Amino acid sequence: MTLERILLNNLYCKLVYKINNKQIIKENINYNECYCCRNSNIKHIICKVVNSPHYNYVNGNKVDYINYMKNAGKYAGYGLEHGFDIFDKLIKEFSVSKMGTIKCVLVNNKYIIEDGVHRSSILLNLEQEFCWVDIRI
């Protein structure tokens, strides 16, 4: 792993797009095909964090995130490590100094978050420009 200071606007997240051909989120011009799941029953897309339901939630548009988490379920971590109360608490109690590093993988010159989409969304909402990222190449 390599620790780097990255522009938040250069971070991408991976979202569950389809489960057994059932579409989970609406198509969007800002969504790109994911590198990871061409032969899987679970399909993903990647998008910049600012185009994610997570970022929308932090900015008051909670419907997209709620629908996404309910439809994607355990494949998006809902009920395992993520939930609405947990996200609300993170937003309310968030501290830049205590947040730790975001974990990413570098694929095709894109920094794709493996751990930290919620924190990145909050940082963007707070108008932070950079964050520390642990990069797996």
Image (cartoon, rainbow, N blue to C red):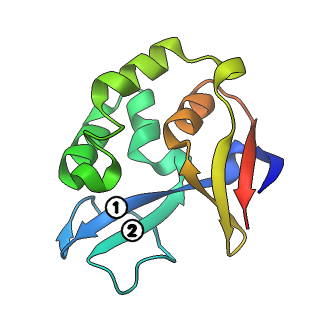
The residue that disc 2 covers is 44
Q: Residue at left 49%, top 64%?
A: 46
Mark 1 to mark 2 CA distance (whole Å) = 4 Å
Residue 101 vs residue 111, the one in the foreground: 101
How many other residues sit within 10 Å of disc 2, few (<14), some (14-19) or many (≥20)?
many
Quarter placement of the N terminus: bottom right
Q: Where's residue 7, x and y in %?
A: 76, 45
Q: Which of marks 1 and 2 is nearer the N terminus?
A: 1
Query: What residue type is disc 2 on?
Result: His
The residue that disc 1 covers is 16
Query: What residue type is disc 1 on?
Result: Val
Quarter holding residue 16: bottom left
Whether pointer 1 and pointer 2 mark residues with C-beta atoms closer than 8 Å, the reply is yes
Q: SS class of the residue under badge 1?
A: strand
Q: Where's residue 99, x and y in %?
A: 64, 26
Q: Where's residue 55, x and y in %?
A: 47, 38
Query: Residue reaching furthest bottom?
Result: 39
